[in-house]
């Protein structure tokens, strides 16, 4: 599985951005996909996750009500719609795919896309 993120950039506080993560390869075996972020000097943290099948989602408390994760299976693409952005949302955003292959878990990461929110 290969993942390519896009959509990052510079935005003012209160603004919006939509990130995309295009998946290719053996996408049929992906069990869940998620967005993570890593700010300078901080650990990478989970932002949101969407599971295959039922499409259930979970969000970090810090983004609930502002961010929406979605997935277009026909396009093999996952999105993160971000609204009401805050300076503390500034980070490199990564997409991740979890795959189950012959009963074993595998994880794949994209290269990351920078999101900068100015105050």
Image: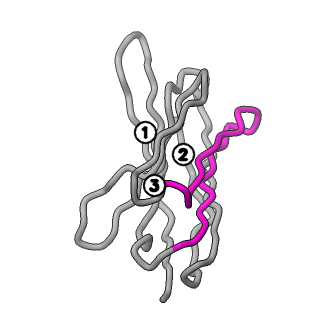
Of badges 2 and 3, the one in the foreground is: 3
Residue at mark 1 to residue at mark 3: CA–CA distance: 10 Å
Q: Residues within 10 Å of mark 2 (few under 14, many from 20)?
A: many
Q: How crowded is mark 1: few (under 14 residues within 10 Å), some or many (20 or more)?
A: some
Q: Position of residue 71 (x, y in %)?
A: 65, 40
Q: Are marks 1 and 2 in contact (CB under 8 Å)?
A: yes
Q: Write the residue at 35% across / 63% down.
A: 38
In this picture, is 109 found above or below 8? above
- Label 1, secondary structure: give it: strand
Which residue position holds label 1? Answer: 108
Q: Which of marks 1 and 3 is nearer the N terminus?
A: 3
Q: Write the residue at 63% across / 65% down.
A: 7
Q: Write the residue at 49% across / 54% down.
A: 64
- Residue 113 part of the magenta-drawn span: no
Q: Which residue lies furthest to the bottom in this view?
A: 119
Which residue position holds label 3? Answer: 94
Q: Write the residue at 38% across / 49% down.
A: 46
- Label 2, secondary structure: give it: strand
Q: Are marks 2 and 3 in contact (CB under 8 Å)?
A: no
Label for residue 12? none
- Residue 66 part of the magenta-drawn span: yes
Q: Position of residue 59 (x, y in %)?
A: 46, 47
Magenta residues span: 64-85
Q: Which of marks 1 and 2 is nearer the N terminus?
A: 2
């Amino acid at each position: 599985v290969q993942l390519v993120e896009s959509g990052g950039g510079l935005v003012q506080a209160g603004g919006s951005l939509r990130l995309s993560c295009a998946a290719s390869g053996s996408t049929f075996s992906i069990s869940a996909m998620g967005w993570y972020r890593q700010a300078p000097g901080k650990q990478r943290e989970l932002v949101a996750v969407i599971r295959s099948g039922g499409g259930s989602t979970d969000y970090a408390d810090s983004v609930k009500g502002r961010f929406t994760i979605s997935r277009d299976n026909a396009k093999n693409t996952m999105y993160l719609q971000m609204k009401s952005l805050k300076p503390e949302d500034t980070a490199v955003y990564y997409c991740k795919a979890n795959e189950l292959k012959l009963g074993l878990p595998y994880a794949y990461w994209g290269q990351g896309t920078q999101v900068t929110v100015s105050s």
